[in-house]
Image (spheres, rainbow, N blue to C red):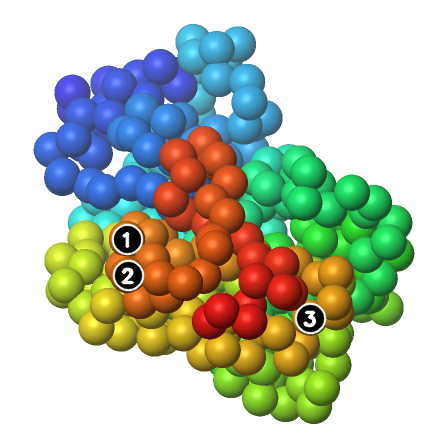
Amino acid sequence: MKTARLRTVRDLLRFAVNRFNQAGLSFGHGTHNARDEAAYLILHTLQLPLDQLEPFLDTPLTRKQITAVLDILRQRTTKKIPAAYLTHEAWLGDLRFYIDQRVIVPRSFIAELLRARLKPWIKDVDAVTTALDLCTGSGCLAILMAKVFPNAVIDAIDISRSALAVARRNIAEYGLEDRINLIQSDLFKVLRGRRYNLVVANPPYVNAQAMRALPAEFRHEPRLALNGGNDGLAYVRPILQSAAKHLRKTGLLVVEIGHNRETLERAFPKTAFTWPDTSAGNEYVFLLKHHQLSCV
């Protein structure tokens, strides 16, 4: 279809899906297929409600509107930049976060568990008064914890000063500066014996083989936030080895590890990991209570 013939949202959607398929794009930064991503970029650029495509499909557009959409579609197809970096936003459920290339695009299965209030492993959300978010990145999980656990004061840690600047912006947008403390640190190193009811971590966990095979879209993300070393456990190991010193006796550790369940269980055969169900299955996040860390 020639661009001169594009007149409606429906025309743009058909055009975008065709171009995305021709370009061989990879998805996974908020959407999982060409149509959903095209719809998102079109609606966002036209400043239309993101959940209301159908009512606007046959809306006639101005040439200025069409040009704006074509520009963002061109960036997506020629540079293979993830949509979240083009729109500077990402969503976890109904929570919106500012995003740029200083941080990875939020897509944590831990968010699903937090929205369910970590039931049944945490029985009283009001009893969670201290929490820690390791490798906070954009601050999205720390913000979600603040929403779920109303009495919690949260420390959010990242080794990257640039990532913390993004987190600071998101925390300010949610008015949570008095409940979330941003700390620059390599994992637990500067915490000096602080203990928490809850520790969550979404560390770098992509193994060396997978890093070499990453699609172009994922190479726009900070390598520091993805690279989990040769077997993907370069950060998971020190988290397991130090977590007990920073958990209260009834505390809970929650860690996301991608596709590394078998590797982890081989590395720690005596540890009784709990693998909660997520929308993608039960191999991506593990839970441990304080007493279970004695077998690490």
Residue 104: percent from left, percent from top: 43, 61
Q: Nearer the viewer, residue 219 or 58?
A: 219
Please say if 142 is above or below 182: above
Q: Nearer the viewer, residue 116 or 2?
A: 116
Which quadrant holds the N terminus?
A: top left
Instruction: Give the number of the mark in front: 2 or 1.
Output: 2
Residue occupied by mark 2: 266
Residue occupied by mark 3: 247
Residue 262 numbered mark, or none: 1
Instruction: Give the number of the mark in front: 2 or 3.
Output: 2
Tell me whether circle 2 and circle 1 mark residues in contact (CB < 8 Å): yes
| Mark 1: few/some/many CA within 10 Å (<14, 14-19, 20+) | few
Disc 2 residue type? Arg
Separation of marks 2 and 1 at Cα, in angstroms: 6 Å
Separation of marks 3 and 1 at Cα, in angstroms: 25 Å
Is residue 65 found left or right of 25 in the rendered image?
A: right
Q: Quadrant of residue 129?
A: bottom right
The secondary structure type at the circle numbered 3 is: strand
Residue 69 numbered mark, or none: none
Q: Quadrant of residue 219?
A: bottom left
